[in-house]
Image (tube, rainbow, N blue to C red):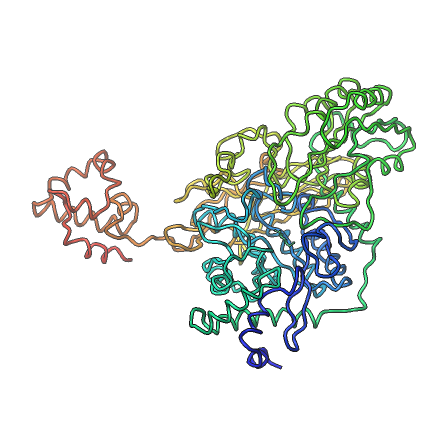
Amino acid sequence: MHTDARLARLSTVDKAALTSGSDFWHTTAVADVPEVMLTDGPHGVRKQAGAGGLGSLLASEPSTCFPPAVAMGSTWDPELVGRVGVALGEEARAMGVSVLLGPGINLKRTPLGGRNFEYYAEDPLLTGVLAVAWVRGLQSQGVGASVKHFALNSQETDRMRVSADVDERTVREMYLRAFQRVVRQARPWAVMCSYNRINGVFASQHHWLLTEVLRDEWGFEGLVVSDWGAVVDRVAAVRAGLDLTMPGPDDAGDRALAQAVADGGLDAATLDMAAARVLSLVDRAVAAADPTAAYDVEAHHALAREVAARGIVLLKNEGGLLPLPQRGLSIAVIGEAARTPRFQGGGSSQIVPTRLDDALAAITAATTAAVTFAAGYTMDGAADDKLAAEAVEAARSSEVAVVFLAAPHETEGADRETLDLPADQLGLLDRVAAANLRTVVVLSNGAVVLTTPWDRTVPALVEGWLGGQAGGTAIADVLFGQMNPSGRLAETIPLALPHHPSFLDFPEAGHVRYGEGIHVGYRGFDAREQEVAYPFGFGLSYTTFSYGAATASTVEDGIEVRVPVTNTGDRDGREVVQVYASLPVSRVRRAPRELKGFTNAAIAAGQMVEVVVHIARSDLAYWDPQLHRWAVEAGDYVLTVGASSRDLRASVTVVLDGDDTRVPLTGDSTLGEWLNDPKGAEVIAQAFAEAMAGGGGGGMAAMAADPDILLFLSNVPLRRLAAYPGSPVTPEQIDALVARSFP
Ligand code: BGC
């Protein structure tokens, strides 16, 4: 039966009930409409038994714990991330889950973000491209994605109340851009609104965000679901465009909605629309459900291993210490984290894995040489001299020391206080590095940790992130060269926390000011010419690549950049070819370089391939704050091809025709603005000439021939200039001048 007809048979109270959950994880069954299940989360299916709830947060059915987004983001490989989406879809379907609450695509604005491990990158293009792949993969299995957290939920501190205070250009270009891409290109079944306020208004009640932007501009046709507990006022939320409030039940809210319809406070059609969207989602879910579905646990573990290995970033490898030979060198494996892996973060994404690999076992299995293990430290951060002394001895008596260091537990709900690794671990590293010159450090962390100055004391450094359930084996794959590392940083590693562009603006008194504006992450480091420890886009390989000259051509919907890249080493490898755009002459402030395209290319040893990077014209657009719309500015775009944001190998300039970005002139436009506009300059020149011919303001008009005088007057709005005695334009003339300034 048609949705409208089915809705017509429901009472207002039933319609209201459809728009709230029946428990923690299910929609409400009403009349012949069944309930469906929505559950977390971005890197695994966290299905809780029964009604779920806070009391059973950590109890869920086993499922594959894929690497969290921090590791997936570092793969820079949409094809691979898409395969994770497919696998998650298979697991969700087999577990009777209709909607998976992910991906998380907030930008990593601050490195302190407690949930950075759940987000991909500090760049909206990289985030968006990967998220599109994830959503398409998941939804290909008949399971819906719920893209979250919409929007501006880039830190955990005070997340349920804080107002993100931010200007529209920054919102559009940085914080909404990945959402826009995913909505347009992958059509997710759902979007989850965030907890926080945006410029004072709760996201769950934000009409501009949920209706004007999401639906009217982007054409979103799916369901808007609340983050769990984000709704403060059901009526205001439904009015703003929110469809489903979770969790439930919320009988009082349902009644309030029905009452609001009865007394005219809420349009009946608005509630109908929300209920209809829930109905459509349920219909889709029911049509796709397959009680016979199953998935291959072993194959998914293997995929988790592949993704974890591909996300590992080799930061340093002096003298080619890595890869280690599988026969030969005796190894001291040091650090409790080698035996007790930190493989995921805490909170709603926490998975009970089907299996769990640890690096110690994987290393032991991978080598024929002697392996000595020493815990070195405990995970509680208290220094332990005895453990440290044993570790130093193991390092001294082995040919290589591999030291596993782990950041303290990271979790949803709380931000980190520091980027430092625990002092006891760093103290231990000092001693081990002194005892064995061949020391390799392997990091486990969900967001960046400071690597300076201790990284200077070791020849090799491997960023292993939180690698999911197969992360331990993936580390061994990279250490012994079974996998040639190709991960790239999706976030800058700073030299110190205060260097970070976000540093001065952290939540305080209910507000977090996004003071760095569009200069998030590497954009801010580059704009301030700040040194960093390891730049965005950086990562080494066991082979080397050389770049030839780049060429670019305009194609129908953008630009195609081509660059020959040669694998100059003796191992097959992958190079992530990144293209950054700059527009040196622009009417708005721009970051020195912005990532506009990338290609992840597998290149066999000794081979050359021509790598093609496609840049969509829409990705070159900026948000014009005066015109309140996207526009591509005309100009000479410098496209720089890099192996990282600071390892730029080739560049090519492309001249682009722009969209019309002329801002209409008014009486409030300054003399400078009038003169910068070709038509405006003509009109003013004429007015000044008339004044000179006819006396009146002629004196001042004549003076304006002097560039110094013009400069002095350049910031005076025309109407205010007219008010001065002796002005060459009169207040009565303004309307006519404005009319003549239209092309
Ligand atoms: C989180 C969401 C999650 C939801 C359901 C919230 O606390 O912010 O990401 O999907 O809980 O567990």
- Residue farthest along the front direction in this orientation: 252
Above-or-below relation of 339 to 172: above
Question: How many dots with numbers?
Answer: 0
- The x and y percentages for residue 607 are 74, 42
The answer to whether residue 610 shows anywhere in this view is: no
Residue at the extreme top: 434
Q: Which percent across, then down, holds residue 444? A: 72, 36
Which residue shows up at 25% across the image and 36% down it? Answer: 711
Location of residue 150 by image quarter: bottom right
Q: Nearer the viewer, residue 304 or 24?
A: 24
Location of residue 397 by image quarter: top right
Instruction: Determine which quarter of the picture holds residue 436.
Output: top right
Q: Residue at x 19, y 57 (%)?
A: 736
User: Residue furthest toward the left?
Assistant: 695
The x and y percentages for residue 561 are 58, 48
167 or 54, nearer to the observer: 54
* Side of 549 where 389 appears, left or right: right
Residue 172 visible in rendering = yes
For the N terminus, the image quarter is bottom right
Indicate the quadrant containing the C terminus: top left, top right, bottom left or bottom right: bottom left
Residue 96 % position (x, y): 74, 64
Q: Nearer the viewer, residue 8 or 675?
A: 8
Check the image and report above or below for 147 versus 269.
Answer: above
Position of residue 236 in the picture relative to residue 25 (left or right): left
In the image shown, does 662 or 237 lie closer to the viewer? 237
